[in-house]
Amino acid sequence: MTTASNSQPETAYLVFDIESVPDGLLISRTKYREENLSPADAVARAQAEARDLSPTGSDFLPVSFQVPVSVCVARVAADFQFLAIQCLDEPQFRPEEITKRFWKGLDHYKRAKLVSFNGRSFDMPLMELAAFRYGLSAPLHFKGERGGARNRYSEQHLDLHELLTNYGACRMAGGLNLLSKLLGKPGKWDTTGDQVYELWRQGQYATINAYCSYDVLDTYFVFLRTRVLTGELTLEREQEIVQETKTWLVQETARQPHLQRYLDNWGDWKPWM
């Protein structure tokens, strides 16, 4: 994560999202050790088994079988001003380097609070296991200044999914996509999470990272609306920040062209009922 310049406000929040793919070699060695399956065949078989067991037909595999292939982070000021967005290890997008930069960034912005959507149950465990895989240390996260982020009710990590489901008391049907569309923001359009593995197999790493950055932007706008809910922002100020962020994104497209597609699908908040 790039450090803030002296001219910018201090980073108070890190809004992040992570995309991952199944580790076929690990699956082959653990689930099908006696069958000598190729990594691709092991993933295909595990996904088929997952579909058979899932009431919704999902083939998504547990976090323990996943490896991060994209991490995008937005830096946000204490007054909720949008400061920057970055995908780690761009344009190489190497899992080990992504993991190293993620933990290094959290150490650098140690006073910043984490903001995610379902990050406590998936994204952070994924990155903890990735640190384990690559032999990395994260002492501030496990027992130092960030140790509270691993506590479900800690303010050091605001998981918007947990907040909006009353910490699991209800189900968030539609997820981030639904919440984004309620705000007029793009949500999902031509890429969804279940396509990431195939995109990765095709070497379309930039497409995956663009998709990940769009999720971060959606998460940020949902975060803003939750601050209206909690009384930290007025609705009028939230809408001003939204327009300021849109202006920032328009200006940033010269440096990050993929942001134009998010803007092409942009909508303003207009309640229809």
Image (cartoon, grey):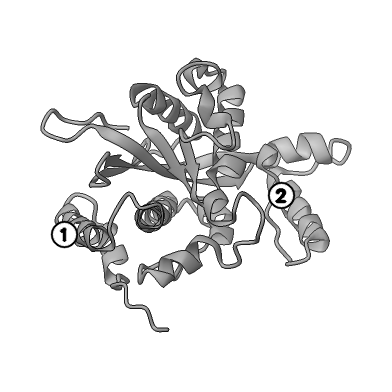
Image: 191 above or below 85:
below
The quadrant in which the N terminus is found is top left
Query: How many C-alpha atoms fall within 10 Å of the one at disc 1: few (<14), some, or many (≥20)?
Result: few
Q: In this view, does 141 lie to the left or right of 259?
A: right
Q: Residue 238: image x %, image y %?
A: 26, 58
Q: Is residue 63 left or right of residue 257?
A: right
Provide the residue designation for mark 1: 247
Q: Amino acid under label 1?
A: Thr
Query: How many C-alpha atoms fall within 10 Å of the one at disc 2: few (<14), some, or many (≥20)?
Result: many
User: Is 217 in front, or is 270?
Assistant: 270
Residue 64, quarter of the rendered image: top right
Please name the residue shown 28% across and 62% down the image: 235
User: Is 75 in front, or is 101?
Assistant: 75
Cα–Cα gap, marks 2 and 1: 42 Å
> In the current view of this chain or complex, which residue is farthest to the right?
34
Q: Residue 117: image x %, image y %?
A: 50, 50
Q: Residue 3: image x %, image y %?
A: 25, 29
Judging from the image, what secondary structure is the residue with disc 2 in?
helix
> In the current view of this chain or complex, which residue is farthest to the left?
7
Please name the residue shown 23% across and 63% down the image: 236
Q: Is residue 249 left or right of residue 199?
A: left
Labels 2 and 1: the sequence-earlier one: 2
Residue 59, quarter of the rendered image: bottom right
**Tag on residue 43?**
2
- Count of labels shown? 2
Q: Amino acid under label 2?
A: Val
User: Is 164 in front, or is 141?
Assistant: 164
Please state which of the two labelled residues, at mark 2 or mark 1, is closer to the viewer.
Answer: 1
Image: 194 above or below 91:
below
